[in-house]
Amino acid sequence: DAKTTQPNSMESNEEEPVHLPCNHSTISGTDYIHWYRQLPSQGPEYVIHGLTSNVNNRMASLAIAEDRKSSTLILHRATLRDAAVYYCIPQNYGGSQGNLIFGKGTKLSVKP
Amino acid sequence: KAGVTQTPRYLIKTRGQQVTLSCSPISGHRSVSWYQQTPGQGLQFLFEYFSETQRNKGNFPGRFSGRQFSNSRSEMNVSTLELGDSALYLCASSLYFAGANPSTDTQYFGPGTRLTVL
């Protein structure tokens, strides 16, 4: 399984953009990069995923480096509700059969 | 569409007892995965069921077991509870089993069952 490196914590001000980085240098060519987040006292919530090109949805954007060794989750305007732990997960379809392997994630704090 | 539901939400047991947790997936979803979350180990994959068959299993002892019914509802059982089994147990549902369609693979998590073992 690909190993990931994420900052333990990050801070942002409300209504400002947030860039959450993730390094996954051992990712294989077929691993999708998934991002989930976990709000306090809730189960994880899917945010976005992609393979090679950048992806956008109503929640966030995902920028994937050309060599795929890193990616960045972009929240365009952080709100207080975005305070959560964000997990970057290269989903391995060769070894662990695609089940989510969570790391420690990045705890995002949003200041009003 | 209703989300993933888990019952009970909170449970207190004593060492040596056994416990059964229940998970109802989103309507139409046929895969259910179970995870354990503790402050020390984080979120760890327990097992996945699809069409009543266990497809994959994480690195947990045999005291942890599960099953899935024909309506896709799933239960997990922990026998001979230990103090270290105190955790938040999460289930997640998806349309197909993990890896069936990587481009659309998304898991939807329930709120979890908080198990405390005394």
Image: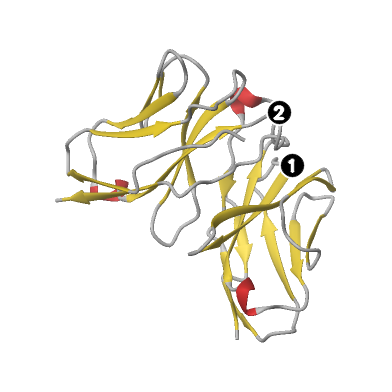
Q: Is residue B1 visible?
A: no
Please tell me whether residue A107 is drawn above or below residue A62 in the rendered image: below
Residue annotated with mark 1: B30
Q: Position of residue B110 (x, y in %)?
A: 56, 55
User: Could you tell me residue B118's position as x and y percent?
Assistant: 60, 86
Indicate left or right for B105 with A103 as reference: right
Q: Secondary structure at mark 2?
A: loop
Task: Residue B10: give x, y in percent of width and height.
Answer: 56, 74
Quick one: A88 or B6, which is closer to the camera?
A88
Q: Position of residue B46 (x, y in %)?
A: 69, 54
Residue plotted at (71% across, 33% down): A95
Tell me the subunit letter for badge 2: A
Q: Residue at x 76, y 67 (%)?
A: B77
Q: Residue at x 70, y 37 (%)?
A: A96
| In-front residue for pair A88/B89 | A88
Q: Where A93 falls versus A13 (above or below)?
A: above
**Disc 2 marks which residue?**
A94
